[in-house]
Image (cartoon, grey):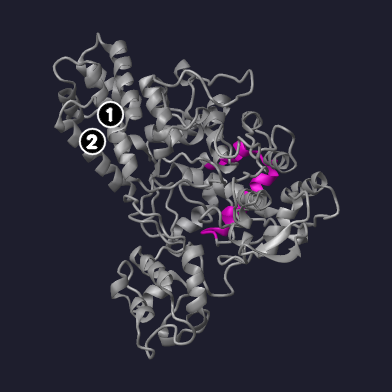
């Protein structure tokens, strides 16, 4: 390894500890419970009849997580001290719950115990209480308050006015540049560009920076390819490609982002595809026997619903959904659109003897003619998805874009668009703005990132707030994605791969600005163990948000993994070759400016000098890089 002594290892452990504290997360050891599929069915089977929706025997309510805790039936985090656990395990028939019917079996008891011990994980905005919020379908006009300033800021001014001690401070120029550059093009700012920006006295420089970043077509496309690869299940190799059941769409997708194709056209070409874009609607043909809900037709139904409408149709692909109002027939109606033969409906993997009839989720917008050939049914579906009155189409994507920049959607989670937004007017305004501007994604991104709200200091939370308690207070502190981290490390060290693995279209432009920005980005190469450890998914299914939990494996990979060791070692050699004639202070300041966009303070300069030793060499520079790369300041977008 390149660290020379135990003191260096201690510095690493401290850096990792600071990272864990700063992000407010902990190690993840055990696969978390699936609330919707493991816990809800047990509660529905045994508890809800007596303890929800107006019936609260013994004063116990399961309507919401908060109501359950307030009823004192559970002690969050300790099943052994919880009355609920005592009752469901009691052998005394006078106190056992439920009082009628069969007792919970051992597996059900274990699941509920794990659930309580895990502090009751609960899907945001889920409730057993009827008569809850109903998400609108059509567009709604929102009146923006009169006055000067950005429309988003004027719209949110009354919201902020209601908050006490709200976050109204703006970030400094250097922090804004770093945030905007990482958010819009996925890259750290170069030191010379950052210094020029900070020195610029133009009061409109932040808006102009956003415009310049959006005009950097190559850097923008490389960055957003990652977002769309996740969302559209696009990868360059992997499960499903061997048997022809899966096909990548990279060239079409890259060109679509590069040319800023209108989103309605983008969606139509995915749903009613040409040969270059048909990979999205092609499901994976899993080998061996699979559950009926995993066949290619149901994958189509699930993916269309999730990507374009923020609907979780996976639950409804097996049975009527536990978490919303979608039914088994709804999932199969979409699936029947793409089926080449009659599609029998299976409930919980058992045949019903009935065939699905092609249909759309919102028949008030139009219907699918089941007698038409498949390509014509897909054409009808594409038209309904992008229907001028289908506000759900725009709300879903603007919510995803807001989440990318602010760290949390206006509706949370982004795949539960039936949930109530924290601000209805903001969501509806952005959806209408997007439609009125001809579904221009770059214009939407520029509109959000040029607002004052986007420039607020980063908000932090000790723990993820429940939906009913969430107060928007500015962009949240975010972790770099695996691709952003790798690109940042490669940019600093000059160690990017020599060629891309992705089949890119020909004659794509270079990134603007310095030649240093023209390197092969992480999104364009095959995933490796380090990237997977850092959160890059295998994309066998739609991925709309990546896990926020830091893992033990990630800590180990950054501490002693061979891939990261090799990159940092080569980086040390590269920088030593460039700066070997410079003194220690110059080397340290150079590394700090490349990595953090600032000069070191006196204490950092002293510590770094001790790390480099009397005569800096490639190994000691690698040590310095390694410590800086593990700092929260490097890994977080503030």
| Quadrant of the rendering where the C terminus is positioned | top left
User: Residue beneath label 2, please?
Assistant: 12
**Disc on res. 492:** none
Alpha carbon distance from label 2 to label 1: 8 Å
Secondary structure mainly formed by the magenta segment: helix
Q: Residues within 10 Å of mark 2 (few under 14, many from 20)?
A: many
At a point 62% along the width and 44% down the height, the residue shown is 284
Residue 296 place in picture, x, y as percent: 66, 48
Quadrant in which residue 496 is drawn: top left
Element on which disc 2 rests: helix
Placement of 155 over or under 130, stated as above or below: above
Q: Which residues are magenta?
A: 421-448
On the rendered image, what quadrant is the N terminus found in?
top left
Residue hosting label 1: 626
Q: Residue reaching furthest right?
A: 371
Q: Is residue 378 left or right of residue 407?
A: right
The one nearer the camera, 568 or 211, is 568
User: Secondary structure beneath disc 1?
Assistant: helix
- Quarter where residue 254 is shown: top right
Tell me which numbered mark, 2 or 1, is placed earlier along the sequence.
2
Q: Are marks 2 and 1 in contact (CB under 8 Å)?
A: yes
């Amino acid at each position: 390894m390149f660290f020379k002594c135990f003191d260096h290892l201690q510095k690493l452990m401290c850096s990792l500890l600071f990272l864990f504290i700063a992000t407010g997360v902990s190690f993840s050891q055990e696969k978390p419970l699936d609330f919707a599929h493991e816990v809800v069915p047990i509660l529905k089977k045994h508890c809800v009849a007596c303890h929800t929706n107006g019936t609260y025997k013994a004063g116990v309510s399961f309507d919401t997580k908060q109501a359950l805790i307030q009823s004192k039936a559970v002690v969050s985090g300790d099943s052994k001290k919880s009355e609920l656990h005592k009752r469901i395990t009691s052998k005394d028939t006078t106190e056992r719950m439920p009082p009628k019917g069969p007792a919970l079996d051992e597996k059900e008891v274990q699941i509920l115990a794990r659930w309580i011990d895990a502090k009751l994980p609960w899907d945001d905005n889920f409730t057993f209480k009827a008569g809850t919020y109903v998400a609108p379908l059509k567009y709604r006009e929102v009146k923006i308050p009169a006055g000067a300033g950005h429309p988003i800021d004027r719209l949110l001014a009354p919201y902020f006015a209601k908050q006490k001690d709200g976050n109204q401070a703006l970030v400094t120029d250097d922090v804004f540049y770093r945030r905007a550059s990482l958010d819009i093009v996925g890259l750290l700012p170069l030191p010379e560009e950052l210094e020029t920006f900070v020195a610029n006295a133009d009061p409109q420089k932040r808006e102009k920076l956003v415009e310049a970043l959006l005009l950097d077509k190559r850097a923008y496309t490389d960055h957003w390819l990652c977002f769309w690869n996740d969302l559209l299940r696009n990868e360059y190799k992997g499960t499903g490609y061997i048997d022809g059941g899966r096909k990548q769409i990279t060239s079409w997708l890259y060109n679509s982002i590069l040319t800023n194709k209108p989103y309605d056209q983008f969606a139509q070409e995915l749903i009613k595809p040409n040969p270059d874009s048909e990979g999205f609607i092609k499901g994976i043909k899993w080998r061996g026997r699979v559950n009926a809900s995993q066949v290619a037709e149901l994958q189509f139904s699930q993916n269309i619903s999730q990507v374009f409408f923020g609907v979780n149709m996976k639950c409804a692909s097996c049975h009527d959904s536990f978490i919303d109002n979608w039914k088994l027939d709804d999932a199969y109606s979409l699936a029947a659109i793409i089926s080449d033969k009659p599609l029998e409906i299976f409930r919980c993997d058992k045949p019903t003897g009935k065939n699905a009839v092609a249909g759309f989720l919102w028949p008030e917008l139009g219907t699918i003619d089941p007698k038409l050939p498949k390509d014509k049914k897909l054409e009808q579906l594409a038209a309904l998805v992008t229907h001028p009155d289908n506000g759900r189409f725009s709300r879903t994507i603007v919510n995803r874009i807001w989440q990318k920049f602010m760290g949390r959607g206006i509706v949370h989670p982004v795949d539960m668009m039936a949930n109530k937004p924290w601000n209805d007017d903001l969501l509806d305004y952005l959806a209408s703005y997007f439609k009125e501007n001809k579904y221009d994604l770059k214009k939407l991104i520029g509109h959000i990132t040029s607002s004052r709200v986007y420039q607020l200091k980063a908000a932090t939370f000790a723990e993820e707030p429940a939906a009913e308690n969430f107060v928007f207070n500015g962009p949240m502190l975010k972790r770099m994605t695996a691709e952003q981290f790798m690109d940042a490390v490669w940019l600093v060290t000059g160690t990017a791969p020599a060629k891309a693995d992705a089949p890119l279209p020909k004659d794509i432009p270079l990134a603007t600005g310095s030649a240093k920005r023209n390197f092969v980005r992480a999104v364009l190469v095959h995933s490796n163990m380090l990237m997977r450890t850092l959160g890059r998914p295998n994309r066998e299914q739609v991925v709309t948000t990546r896990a926020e939990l830091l893992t033990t494996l990630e800590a180990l990979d950054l501490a002693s993994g061979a891939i990261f060791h090799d990159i940092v070692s080569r980086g040390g050699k590269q920088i030593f070759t460039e700066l070997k004639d410079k003194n220690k202070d110059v080397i340290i300041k150079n590394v700090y400016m490349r990595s953090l966009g600032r000069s070191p303070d006196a204490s950092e300069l002293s510590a770094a000098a001790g790390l480099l030793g009397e005569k800096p060499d490639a190994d000691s520079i690698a040590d310095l890089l390694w410590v800086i790369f593990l700092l929260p300041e490097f890994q977080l977008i503030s």
